[in-house]
Image (cartoon, rainbow, N blue to C red):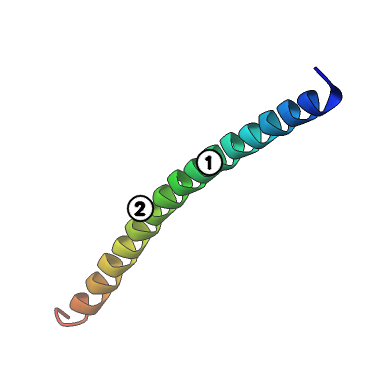
Amino acid sequence: MDWSFWVGLGLIAALWGASQWFFSWRRHSEQVRARSREQADGIVDAERAREQGRYWSGFGG
């Protein structure tokens, strides 16, 4: 086996490792984005409820 075999094997291993790292990072970022979206929706709902309470409280007095 000459040196080109080992270089090719190393290149294949490096590409495989880089693709595994990339897809792992992508899955992680999608999970974080989904969690952030749910938190943002909860914050918007809480603000909306608070504003509705302020709006309707003005009619009682």
Q: Please name the residue shown 73% across and 33% down the image.
A: 11
**SS under mark 2:** helix
Number of the label disc, if any, that sits on residue 3: none
**Position in image of residue 38 (x %, y %):** 35, 53
On the image, the x and y values in percent for residue 26 come to 52, 45
Residue lying furthest front: 1
Looking at the rendered image, the quarter that the C terminus falls into is bottom left
Three-letter amino acid code at disc 2?
A: Glu
Circle 1 crowding by C-alpha within 10 Å: few under 14, some 14–19, many from 20 = few
**Coordinates of residue 35 in the picture (x, y in percent):** 41, 47
Residue with the most extreme right position: 3
Q: What secondary structure is found at the residue carrying circle 1?
A: helix
Q: In screen coordinates, is 8 left or right of 58?
A: right
Alpha-carbon distance for marks 2 and 1?
Answer: 23 Å
Indicate which disc, 2 or 1, sits on the residue closer to the N terminus.
1
Q: Quadrant of residue 55?
A: bottom left
Assess disc 2: are there few (<14), some (14-19) or many (≥20) residues with their C-alpha within 10 Å of its C-alpha.
few
x 15%, y 82%: residue: 59
Q: Residue at x 40, y 50 (%)?
A: 34
Of 4 and 43, nearer the camera is: 4
57 displayed left or right of 37:
left
Question: Would you say 9 lies left or right of 22 here?
Answer: right
- The residue identified by callout 2 is 38
Q: Please name the amino acid that badge 1 sits on.
A: Phe
Quarter of the figure with the N terminus: top right
Q: Which residue is mark 1?
A: 23
In the rendered image, residue 50, in percent from the top left (x then y), is placed at 29, 67
Looking at the rendered structure, the number of numbered marks drawn on it comes to 2
